[in-house]
Amino acid sequence: MRKTLTKLSTAALATVFMMSASTDLLAQSADQKTNLQIYGSALQYKGEMEDQLWESNRLEWGGGIGLNRYLSPSFDIGLHGTYGSTEARVDDQNNFDSRLGTVMLNVRLKMYGNILKEDAFIGPYLFAAGGAMFAKSDGAADGNSFRNSFATGVGMGGAGLRFRFSDAISAFIQTGYIFQGQDKIDARFDDDDNDKFLMHNIGLGFNLGKAKDTDADGVPDRRDKCPDTPSGVQVDKEGCPVDTDGDGVADYQDECPGEAGVANLGGCPDRDSDGIADKDDQCPDQAGTAATQGCPDADGDGVADANDKCPDTPAGQKVGPDGCATDSDGDGVGDDVDICPNSAGPADKGGCPELDAQTLKLMEEKVRFEFDQARVQQGYQQLLDSIVVALEKYPDHVLLIKGHADHIGSEEYNQALSERRAQAVKDYLVERGVQNPDRLVTKGYGETQPLVKVNTRLSKSRTASARARNRRVGFEMNTPDMKLDMD
C-alpha cells in the first residue's frame, strides 16, 4: 500500500510539471484568494511503545484536503481535514494498528509576500494549526489486547515550501509536529508523555476564481503595468505591449517592428536624421526634405539636387520638374517675375503684351445711360461683348470700369448712381463669361468728371444733349499690377 501511494504522488507531481512547462512562473496573490489543496499524508509515531520519528522506512500513508483563504501578504487561514494510519509492532505482545482523522484550522505565516516576492517560484512558510482528532486503535500491550476509540484536541506546528507553477496551480511539501490530548494510541499510559506524530504532506494547490483583468490581456490588474492595452494586442509578462526591437514603440503600433527606430516615424529608423523614415527615403544616407522624398535640395525649390538643372534658383521662385524657373507663356520672363504669366510679352513690360490698336480704340468707347437710370441699354450690348473678347485676348489685364452721372440731383445721389452704373456694366460682363471677375474693378465718380461743361443756369431742356453725354461708363485696361488711373 505504501509503495502504491508513493508512486501515485510522484505521478501527480510529474503531471503538474508537464502541464506547467509552457506557463510563465507567476505569483499567487490577492487576485485569487481561495485555494484548494489535495495531498498525500504520511505519519510517523512517537510514544511509549516505539519512536519512529525521521525513520524513512516507517512511513504510514494517508491523505487530506484543505481549503485556504488569503488574508494578507503575510497570512493565510485554512480548514484542513486528514485521514491516515499508523502502526507499531515490537513483538506479538506489543503492537497496534490505528486509524486517525483530524479536522484543524490552520494559520500560515508566509515568507513570500513580505520577505520574498509574491511571484517567487519557491515560497517558504511556517504554520500552526489546532482542532480535533478522531482515532481508533487495535493492538496488544504487554500481552493484553485493547481496542480504543476516542476523540481529543490536537495541535500542530511546522514548516513547508510552496512551488508556484502558474496563477492557477502550485505544489507544496510540508512537515508538522502533532501533539494531542490522549495517550490511548498504544494503550500505554504516561501522564507526562502523550503520543505524538510527525505528519509529512505533499500535494497540489489550485487557486479558485479569476483575477481581475480589465484589459483582458491575461495579466491581472495587480501586476499589469499597462492596464489599458487595446484588445487583442500581444503583451509581455508585465502586461505591456510587446516591443520586439526595443525602440519604445509597441509592435502593434510599429511600422518597422524588426528594426529599432523613432516614435515620430512610427518606430522606423532614420539613418540620416532628416525626419524621413528610411523605408520612404530615396536617399537614406543623405539628409533631405519631405518634398524630395528625403533627398538633398540645396536651393529648396522642391526638386532634388540630382534632378535639378538650375541648382541655384533663388528662394521662393516657382520652378518646373527640372528645377528651373517656370515660364508658362514662353516669353522668356519667369513666372515669378512675370506680371502676365498667361500671356506673352516683353521683359521691359514685365512680361505683359502691349494692347493692340483695336483694343486701345475699344477702350475709348462709352456706354450711355438714360436719365436717372443704371440699366444697360440693349444698343450697347455689342460693345460690351467686344470688351469680353478683348479680356479673353489679354487674360492677365485688369479692366477699370468708370461710372459717371450728370449734375442733376445732389452730389451724394449722383455718386451712388455712378457706382450703380459701373456695377451694372460689370454684372453684364460677368454674365457673358469673363474669367476671373476679380480683375473687373469698378469706381464711381459721380458728377465730378463731365465730358461736356454744362451751364447749370440753363433749363433742363436746353442742356439735355450735353447732360446725356455725361451720363456714361468708360473703360481703362492695364496690367494686373493695378497701374490704373483711379483719379
Image (cartoon, grey):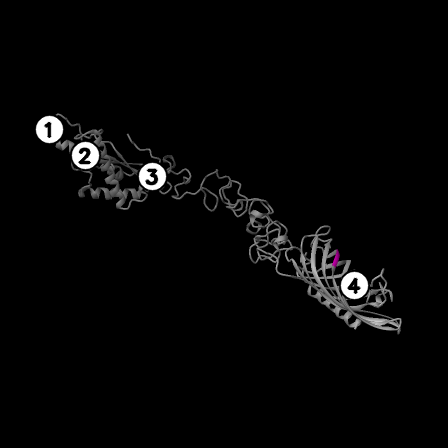
Residue 17 spot, x, y in % from top left = 72, 64
Amino acid at the residue labelled 2: Arg
Q: Earlier in the sequence, mark 3 or mark 4?
A: 4
**Left or right, 454 with reference to 119:** left
Q: Is residue 189 left or right of residue 344?
A: right
Task: Check whether the beta carbons of the residues at disc 3 and disc 4 lie within 8 A of each other.
Answer: no
Up the image or down, 303 lies above or below 95; here it is: above
Near mark 4 (Cα within 10 A), the count class, few <14, some 14-19 or many ≥20, is many
Mark earlier in primary sequence (2, 3): 3
What's the residue type where badge 1 is placed?
Ser
For label 4, the residue is 199
The residue where tag 1 is placed is 459
Q: Secondary structure at mark 4?
A: strand
Residue 412 quadrant: top left
Type of the residue with mark 3: Pro
Could you tell which of marks 1 and 2 lies nearer the N-terminus?
Answer: 1
Mark 3 crowd level (few <14, some 14–19, many ≥20, 10 Å Cα): some
Of label 4 and label 2, which has the lower sequence position?
Answer: 4
Q: Nearer the viewer, residue 385 or 225?
A: 225
CA distance separating discs 3 and 4: 114 Å
Q: Which residues are magenta?
A: 125-129
Identity, as a three-letter code, of the amino acid under mark 4: Met
Looking at the rendered structure, the secondary structure element under dot 2 is loop
Q: Nearer the viewer, mark 3 or mark 4?
A: 4
Residue 281 at x, y percent in the picture: 55, 49
**Could you classify mark 2 by the number of other residues whose Cα lies within 10 Å: few (under 14), some (14-19), or many (20 or more)?**
many
Quarter holding residue 435:
top left
Quadrant, the N terminus: bottom right
Q: The C terminus lies in which quarter of the figure?
A: top left
Q: CA distance from mark 1 to mark 4?
A: 140 Å
Q: Please name which of the two marks, 4 or 2, marks the residue nearer to the observer.
A: 4
